[in-house]
Image (cartoon, rainbow, N blue to C red):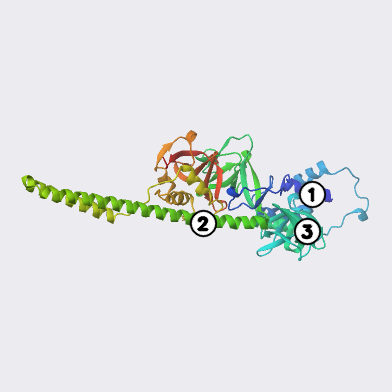
Amino acid sequence: MIKTRWVRNAAIFGTAVTLSLASVSVPVNEGSAASFCQETEMAGLSLSLDKFYSVNFANADSLNSVNPTASPLSADAATATAAPSAAPSSESEKEPEEKSEEQRKEETVAKQFRDLGISKVTDYVNIRKKPTTESKILGKLYRGSAAKILGEKSGWVRIESGSVTGYIRKDLLAIGAEAQELAGKFGTAFASVNKGVITLNVRSKKSTESSIVTQIPEDEKYEILGESDNWYRISVDDGTKGYIAKQYSHMRVRFKKAISIAEEKAELRRKREAEEAERQRLAELAAERERASSSSNSSSSSSSSSNSSSSNSSSSNSSSSRNNSSSSRSNSSSSNNSSSNSNSSTYHATPGGSGSAIANYACKFVGRPYVWGGTSLTNGADCSGFTMSVYAQFGYSLPHSSAAQAGCGRSVSLSSLQPGDLIFYRNGSRIGHVAMYIGGGRVVHASNKTDGIKISSYNYRQPACARRIVG
């Protein structure tokens, strides 16, 4: 009967795919706001995991008690899977009809959650080298982060998450059925294009007849916002959302993972370095503006002195006194106007820095947050606010709008991109996102609230055009 019940559940939930929590090495210069995470293949499971549980697991009792003849699905599954056996010959051979709620839940736990633990503490739980509170702390598992359970010992479990392997008190983790219930709360679903599908249309509505918003390639992940029978609704980047067909894509659920003490220190160091880089660049920009202002004032003063000397010389020449005097007054007036205009102007540093230097500077802020309408490189920016602020610190003035930035600089082809170039992407018929090319077929951009400022392939979605600001 246990086997039959599992088969019925398998028919409901689809084919479960084993959770993989292998450690992933994240390059320091390519960290992201969601660097410390792990992915779990969830093919066959509903996107809405909390709803998935409430609909499928909460009804487990009724499913298990349904008469086989009243449910063709359950009957077929049982017939196809169960080994032939004789009918029970007496009441003593029947299994107990009553089981505890906990037993029923455990029997309905999908395979990928049986050895999964999710931190359920308020902040984080320490991962220790040995199963004792006196042991060395190797890392931290923050609330909602997941770990693979490797074994159990005296009220402790040995876990693996990210680059950390160690021990956590068992009572601080949600395991099995409890972890499955929390998956909808802490797991984030992502869609990827199936292998062999070069580009996939993202449509404005759940129909192949609707307009194409953009196109997405393989090897990129897009957060799933919702689903229907045949479609996923995804977020491509800030402000760009649409639908993709399920038959050409697959879903994965990502959980945050443990962070080692070394990784935590490295993250804090990157944050400090980003803040220091911005401080130094702003100081350099101020110095450049001061030099430009001094140079302009010096040039204006020199021009005024030269005109005054010419005027005095002309006044001493008696043969053309009246004409020269008039010329002198004219030059003096012109000189004064020029000086007055120069002194009242707002000076800007002469734009400088190569495209590569600007791109390298932009990469220092990978991992900083995305904030809609923001322009802070360290505290948060949106896509155009990010590129605007980076270029501003090299003396270039760009508008805070991706569509407006698409009219700045000069047009370049996608086949001749150089670091520092801006690449633009359409939302339907209009420009709706901008990223900065950094070389190697990659861009850095303020993507969305989930990923923050990150590095992506330049064709993570279909590019519309590119502009060169430098050179």
Residue 371: in sight, yes or no?
no
Real-space Cα distance between discs 1 and 2?
57 Å
What numbered label is drawn on residue 90?
Answer: none
Relative height, residue 125 to residue 302 (above, below): below
In the image, 61 versus 277, the foreground residue is 277
Q: Which residue is mark 3?
A: 157
Marks 1 and 2 in Cβ contact (< 8 Å):
no
Specify few, some or many for label 3: CA neighbours under 10 Å numbering under 14, 14-19, or 20 or more. many
Classify mark 3: helix, strand or loop.
strand
Amino acid type shown at disc 2: Glu
Specify few, some or many for label 1: CA neighbours under 10 Å numbering under 14, 14-19, or 20 or more. some
In the image, 150 versus 334, the foreground residue is 334
In the image, 355 versus 417, the foreground residue is 355
In primary-sequence order, the first of circles 1 and 2 is 1
Residue 103: in sight, yes or no?
yes
Real-space Cα distance between discs 2 and 3?
41 Å
Amino acid type shown at disc 3: Val
What numbered label is drawn on residue 276?
Answer: 2
- Residue 49 rendering spot, x and y as whole percentages: 66, 53
In this rendering, which labeled residue sits more in front, label 2 or label 3?
Answer: 2
In this rendering, which labeled residue sits more in front, label 1 or label 3?
Answer: 3
Q: Which residue is mark 1?
A: 6
- Residue 188 rendering spot, x and y as whole percentages: 63, 52
Classify mark 1: helix, strand or loop.
helix
In primary-sequence order, the first of circles 2 and 3 is 3
- Residue 174 rendering spot, x and y as whole percentages: 73, 60
Q: Is residue 412 left or right of residue 67?
A: left
Real-space Cα distance between discs 1 and 3?
27 Å
Which residue shows up at 17% across the image and 48% down it? 310
Which residue shows up at 58% across the image and 48% down it? 29
